[in-house]
Amino acid sequence: MLTSYVMLDSTTHGIPSGNYDGSSLAFEGNVVTAANFYQGLGDLQTVIIRVTGFVGKIIIRATLNNEYQSAVWFDADEFGDYVHPFTGVFTLNIRGNFVWMKPDIIDFSAGTIDSITITY
């Protein structure tokens, strides 16, 4: 059985949407369950990032804690480089027995994040 969640809906620089106020350089996407949420049923998560002219960095953060509200988060992978605009569909295959994952966007200075999804 394939599980898929939206970590971030379409977000365009300068336009408020979800957790993004339209002017800040940093914000969080949705916290979603990861492959190990179901107690050991997997350790491979594929994050699919769709962007158009995106300038900034997307940090995929993960935790092993059962409760995400009080969790200790760490960086599992990242995308972007703060300088060059990226357009296309990019995948990050992340291995780990993570319980929760989320995207943190930093230095978002141009473009559109069309979506960030996770599948496992």
Image (spheres, rainbow, N blue to C red):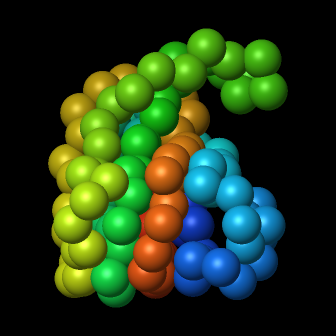
Above or below residue 48? Residue 96 is above
> Is any part of residue 119 visible from this angle?
no
Say which residue appears at 52% left-offset and 40% top-offset: 101
- Which of the pair 100/111 is nearer the observer? 111
Q: How many discs appear?
A: 0
**With 120 as the anchor, is 29 left or right in this view?**
right
- Which of the pair 116/36 is nearer the observer? 116
Say which residue appears at 46% left-offset and 21% top-offset: 74
Say which residue appears at 61% left-offset and 50% top-offset: 26
| Residue 88 image-quadrant placement | bottom left
| Residue 16 image-quadrant placement | bottom right
**With 37 as the anchor, is 35 left or right in this view?**
left
| Quadrant holding the C terminus | bottom left
| Quadrant holding the N terminus | bottom left
Say which residue appears at 45% left-offset and 75% top-offset: 110
Above or below residue 28? Residue 11 is below
> Is any part of residue 77 visible from this angle?
yes
Where is residue 45? Give x, y as percent: 31, 47
- Which of the pair 120/12 is nearer the observer? 12
Above or below residue 63? Residue 83 is below
**With 105 as the anchor, is 50 left or right in this view?**
left
Where is residue 58? Give x, y as percent: 41, 51
Above or below residue 110? Residue 28 is above
